Image (cartoon, helix red, strand yellow):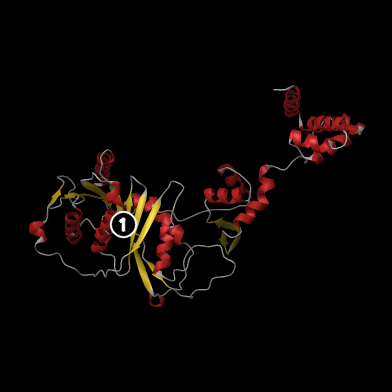
Amino acid sequence: MDTENKTKQNMISFFNSLSEKDRRRYAAIEAQKLGYGGITSIAVLFNCDEKTIRKGLSELDDEYAMNKDSIRNPGGGRKSEIESINEIFLEVLSNHTAGNPMKDNVKWTNLSKAEIITKMAKRGIKISKNIVRKLLKKNKFVKRKLQKSTATMQHKDRDQQFKKIFKAKKEYESSNNPIISIDTKKTEKIGNLYRDGKVECVEPINVYDHDFPSLAIGKIIPYTVYDIKNNEALVCIGTTFDTSELACDAIKLWWNKLGKSKYPQATSVLCLADGGGSNSSKSNLFKSDLQNLSNEINLDIRMAHYPPGTSKWNPIEHKVFPHITRSLSGVVLKSINLAKELIAKTTTTTGLKVAAIISKKIYEKGRSVLDNFYIDANIIYDNTLGNWNYMVFHKA
């Protein structure tokens, strides 16, 4: 390091060691030494404001100021980081704010802390989650949602089934076989209908003042398959009814479009599912369709159903569905293709990828199990809790 650079480094180190009062006065002295242009040069060197140096210069000529003991005037000093960026923070939230019409002091934002950080960064301001929390608190923002935390039932075999699911997952995690979580997301109506959520827009979006089913021009049933190991989901968008046939078609689509290439050595798949709906643990029709599926894709299917009242533990419920909901939030779904595009754009900071495919197949309600199922089915039920745990073996 040459002498000039070393001197500058020593000046900076000394400047940083001083109190605020002594910093501005030391900077003023150094600026005086340089003469014309000295204020600008020293401001750059010490990374301080030129106004600070000018204040130091005025103090050098003020005997009273030089003899004062206090570093700053009461209530003076630079604004805190929170104060200095608060106005920009409020601008960022302006299009993402809602409130209680009965209480003007209760308001909330639909932006997550991570989204606020990203939007602030686009304004040239880098902040942490802790600063975001302080900004929200300062402006009395409240973010709340109804918490589904009060259990309405608890099955006597709940804990035992959770242990079985945990054991099955551990077994498959260390194998070449996939683990998938399946379920149907809430049916969405298509048409000029009101939807929860907000979007950034330049003018109001007008929709019907009622959302009667008769006003819809269609509907989508997003049956979803989530590949836990690869953090990847496929949404098979049905347009008729939520049936066991749709559930199995969704699994087949996932395997043919994504799974087969990711698991070339797979011999079976662990499938985690709720105990009700189109993939009900009590439905022989679902098991019959699973048998047909297993035969078609040449894979054994290991089913593990969550006990009644525990569907929120199914990974797809918190790993995929909330993010798809966010993608659809506030958007008027005027066509099935628009819904597909929005679902396919779903992503997260953890790398979730979502593919969406529209099924034009007509799924019918009221199908019956064929008699040969009871004779030809190749299904082995576990000795304990077999109604929730069974293996469907494929037939070559």
Residue identified by numbered label 1: 183
Give amino acid for label 1: Asp
Looking at the rendered structure, the number of numbered marks drawn on it comes to 1
Q: Say which of 175 and 128 sits in front.
A: 175
Query: Horizontal placement of 60 versus 110: left or right?
Result: right
Instruction: Name the residue rendered at 21%, 47% in the picture.
Output: 268
Instruction: From this view, report whether residue 243 is shown above or below residue 65.
Output: below
**Residue at the far bottom in the pictured view:** 214
Instruction: From this view, report whether residue 24 is shown above or below residue 137.
Output: above
Q: Say which of 101 and 368 sits in front.
A: 368
Q: Position of residue 323 (x, y in %)?
A: 43, 55
Instruction: From this view, report whether residue 67 is shown above or below residue 367.
Output: above
Instruction: From this view, report whether residue 160 is shown above or below residue 68.
Output: below
Q: Position of residue 93 (x, y in %)?
A: 60, 56
Query: Horizontal placement of 387 versus 140: left or right?
Result: left
Q: Residues within 10 Å of mark 1 (few under 14, many from 20)?
A: many
Which element type, helix, strand or loop, lies under badge 1?
strand
Q: Say which of 368 and 306 sits in front.
A: 368
Instruction: Name the residue rendered at 16%, 46% in the picture.
Output: 382
Q: Position of residue 220 (x, y in %)?
A: 36, 67
**Residue at the far front in the pictured view:** 2
Residue 215 picture quarter: bottom left
Residue 8 picture quarter: top right
Residue 189 shows in the view = yes
Query: Horizontal placement of 256 versus 42: left or right?
Result: left
**Residue at the far left in the pictured view:** 375
Which quadrant is the N terminus positioned in? top right
Q: Position of residue 381 (x, y in %)?
A: 15, 49
